[in-house]
Image (tube, rainbow, N blue to C red):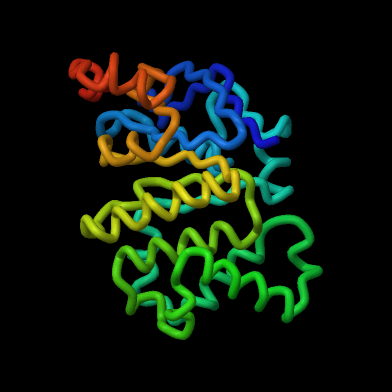
């Protein structure tokens, strides 16, 4: 089971409080949309769950393990914001980028060339970029790049997939296809997904849970409850920092 448990998480950049006393539990198989105003700590919370930064205080457990033990066991896949755009000049093909995901996770060093090729091919097919395998990553559209980044994150077979604004900067149709892909991964493979998004209406329509962050946790519950009781609480959508 890949339960994600945050207990009294606090994080500050010097004296600037980014996350203030957040506690929540995400169950195995949840698809959680993390929403809220700019600068209110959403990406910071995602990086804490990914084990990229340590909270100033508080504890994160994934699957009952300390966050760093969870990373070592390959439980976490992470797709940062605009990662594909940062790879514009990277001289690597799609299949080479996806294969990079196999440098992570359990027993990565034991995988032979045949196993790497099989897993890479399967991941490309899973996200629908197998026809692009020999194209350089910088030649792809934004939506195609995001699919490749998801494939790379999935290559190590994580139980938890974290995505920071996966539809940022891509057109409406490509955005819709990314959400459909994530919904399929969640439903068919049982992968727990936590996704930061500004596209609130679309994100909430795919997610079964919503976490609204404004330094503190303003709301955490079902998508239906969010729509019914919280989506119109406009005072919670403005950044409360200094």
Position of residue 23 in the picture relative to residue 230 (left or right) = right
Which residue is situated farthest in the front direction here? 188
Rendered location of residue 63, percent (x, y): 69, 34
| Image quarter in which the N terminus is found | top right
Residue that appears at 33% across and 21% down: 226
Which residue is situated farthest in the bottom direction here? 134
Q: Where on the picture, by quarter, is residue 13?
A: top left
Q: Where on the picture, by quarter, is residue 114?
A: bottom right
Residue that appears at 30% across and 29% down: 36
Residue that appears at 42% across and 63% down: 147
| Image quarter in which the C terminus is found | top left
Residue 242 shows in the view = no
Rendered location of residue 162, percent (x, y): 50, 45
Q: In terms of depth relative to the viewer, which is nearer, 231 or 235? A: 231
Rendered location of residue 211, percent (x, y): 40, 26
Q: How many marks?
A: 0
Q: Where on the picture, by quarter, is residue 235?
A: top left
Position of residue 217 in the picture relative to residue 188 (left or right) = left
Residue 20's place in the image compared with 1, above or below, is above
Q: In terms of depth relative to the viewer, which is nearer, 223 or 112? A: 223
Residue 228's place in the image compared with 117, above or below, is above
Position of residue 156 in the picture relative to residue 52 (left or right) = right
Q: In terms of depth relative to the viewer, which is nearer, 41 or 64? A: 64
Residue 72 shows in the view = yes
Residue that appears at 62% across and 24% down: 59
């Amino acid at each position: 089971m890949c339960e994600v448990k945050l207990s009294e998480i606090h994080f500050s950049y010097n004296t600037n409080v980014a996350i203030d006393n957040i506690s929540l539990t995400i169950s195995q198989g949840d698809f959680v949309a993390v929403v809220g105003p700019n600068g209110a700590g959403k990406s910071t919370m995602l990086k804490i769950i990914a084990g990229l930064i340590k909270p100033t205080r508080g504890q994160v457990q994934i699957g009952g393990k300390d966050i760093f033990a969870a990373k070592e066991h390959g439980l976490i896949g992470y797709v940062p914001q605009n990662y594909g755009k940062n790879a514009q000049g990277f001289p690597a093909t799609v299949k080479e980028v996806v294969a990079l995901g196999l440098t992570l996770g359990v027993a990565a060093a034991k995988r032979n060339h045949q196993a790497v090729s099989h897993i890479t091919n399967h991941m490309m097919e899973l996200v629908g970029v197998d026809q692009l395998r020999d194209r350089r990553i910088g030649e792809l559209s934004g939506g195609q790049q995001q699919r490749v980044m998801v494939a790379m994150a999935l290559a190590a077979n994580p139980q938890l997939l974290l995505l920071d604004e996966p539809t940022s900067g891509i057109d409406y149709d490509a955005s819709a296809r990314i959400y459909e892909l994530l919904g399929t991964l969640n439903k068919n493979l049982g992968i727990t997904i936590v996704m930061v998004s500004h596209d609130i209406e679309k994100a909430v329509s795919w997610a079964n849970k919503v976490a609204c962050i404004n330094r503190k946790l303003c709301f955490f519950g079902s998508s239906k409850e969010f729509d019914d009781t919280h989506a119109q609480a406009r005072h919670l959508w403005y950044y409360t920092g200094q």
